[in-house]
Amino acid sequence: MAGTILLQAQDPAKLSMEIQNAIEKHSYDDAWRLFEQHMQMEGFPRKSVLNKLLTSYAESLDFQWLEKAHRLVEQAFEEGKQTLFEKETLIYLSYALARCGSTVLASILLRKLVGMEEYPPVAACSAFLAHMSQSPPGAYLAAELILEIGYLFQDNRVDPRKKSNAPLIAMKPNTLTCTIALAGCLLSGTTRKAEQLLDMMPRIGVKTDSTLLIIMAHIYGRNGRREELKKLKRHIDEAHNLTDAQFRQYYNCLLTCHLKFGDLDSASQMVLEMLKKAKEARNSLAAATFFFEAVEDRNVPPSRQVSDATEPDNLEKDRTNPSHFISFEEFLRNRKFMRTEAEAKEMLRSLLVNLQEHVEIIATERGILQPTERSYVKLAKAFLESGKIRELAEFLIKAEKEDSPASADDSALVHVINCCISLGWLDQAHDLLDEMRFSGITASSSVFSSLQKIGQLRLHHFLRKFRKLGFSSILAVMKH
């Protein structure tokens, strides 16, 4: 479309038609030039044209046009013409802005909607809150928005029995939106803001599910709220739908928090309890293995085994693909915003996967908690830094009795001695071995071999220094 059209189009009605034609052809430059001419002649075009212009720019996912669309909305609000916009148009534009990383602009539009009392349903908000939570500034803003919206509902301020309150109640933050914002804050390090959100949730009646419990554990652990973390233990132990990964995450948070507080008694007792339960589970498993293996071999057909293995792949294909941005037409058809909510759930899964990567000191085997090599290293380092060699030896003696490693080189004692060697604490390593030997426990030959090699290297380094100094220097040093 050329500039001649702009010269010929002097009638506002004709300009509106030309704007619509340009939009349908995705000629965004021409549509904007025609819109500007309309603004000079008669101000904003009619409502349907204006909303179509905004939604087409939102669909483009091009920041250039998204920014122009946002400026257009700002101008209309400044001139008191916000009634020109449909609620769904502004929600969709916020969604597009959040998806492109323009979290500040997206949050501004959401606040404008609330200010107009055109409340966006929480299912619609969930997707753009999920996109916002992918970055540290966005996660902070998402939490701020939920706090602001939640304030409207605190202490039963909104009567749910009044029909006139239905649109407002539909915007009330739910478990999904709170979990998304909390996970975003946790991954970006803004855990103090996350705790403000946690404090508000009971006051607006947000229900806690297993995922939210684990997020809470991470936040309390990160913020050093050990008592709150310990209170969660009952809920964790009683929850029937926790996965191994979630169970592991909670106990990782608890053990890390004990170590952070320097509570070595609680930390070492926790590790010993894990070892004891793992030993009991192994013994029970060994007793039942022969019987169950025989039954399974007879009763489980090969075809069923294959289908069980392939089922997760089929489920994966059915999940919503968050890379697909729905058109405004699809957005409108989906009145209950199930598509956007499904997208938000998928994005929450990716946030949770990132959280699992931070679990380092607890593992699970057949659903049973197990301390990792890293947990022994952290615990040993804390004991040694406190000068508690005897207490560490007592812990290791108990651990040796409970643990049954696959090989002698995978025992708690070996991990601890290797930790001492890596830190250069050879004296502490020898003291620890002496304490263990007095109690009748000897380390594997590999431990003594490692210590011997380190000792030889140190001696070699020492002699090399003296050779460099020269023989006369050595005699002078020896006299002193």
Image (spheres, helix red, strand yellow):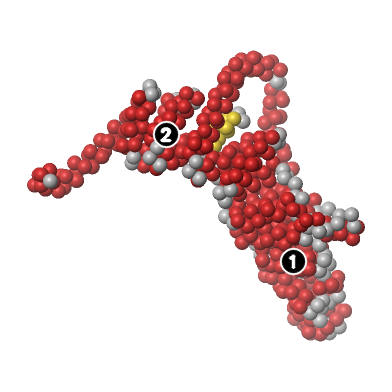
Residue depicted at 39% across the width and 42% down the height: 385
Residue depicted at 54% across the width and 34% down the height: 270
Q: Mark 1 points at which residue?
A: 111
Where is residue 280? Give x, y as percent: 57, 23
Residue depicted at 45% across the width and 31% down the height: 395
Pointers 1 and 2 in contact (C-beta within 8 Å): no
Q: Closer to us: mark 1 or mark 2?
A: 2
Q: In which quarter of the image is residue 315?
A: top right
With 460 as the anchor, is 282 left or right in this view?
right
Task: State how far apart marks 1 and 2 are (Cα).
Answer: 56 Å
Q: In which quarter of the image is residue 362?
A: top right
Q: In which quarter of the image is the N terminus?
A: bottom right
Residue furthest to the right: 163
Q: What residue type is labelled 2?
A: Leu
On residue 293, which mark appears?
none
Where is residue 134? Give x, y as percent: 63, 56
Where is residue 373? Give x, y as percent: 47, 35
Which of 433/417 is in front?
433
With 457 as the anchor, is 10 left or right in this view?
right
Check the image and report above or below for 421 versus 192: above
On residue 392, which mark appears?
2
Q: What residue type is labelled 1?
A: Arg
Which of 227/417 is in front?
227
Check the image and report above or below for 394 versus 166: above
Q: Is mark 2 on a helix, strand or loop?
A: helix
Mark 1 or mark 2, earlier in chain: 1
Q: How many labels does the image show?
A: 2
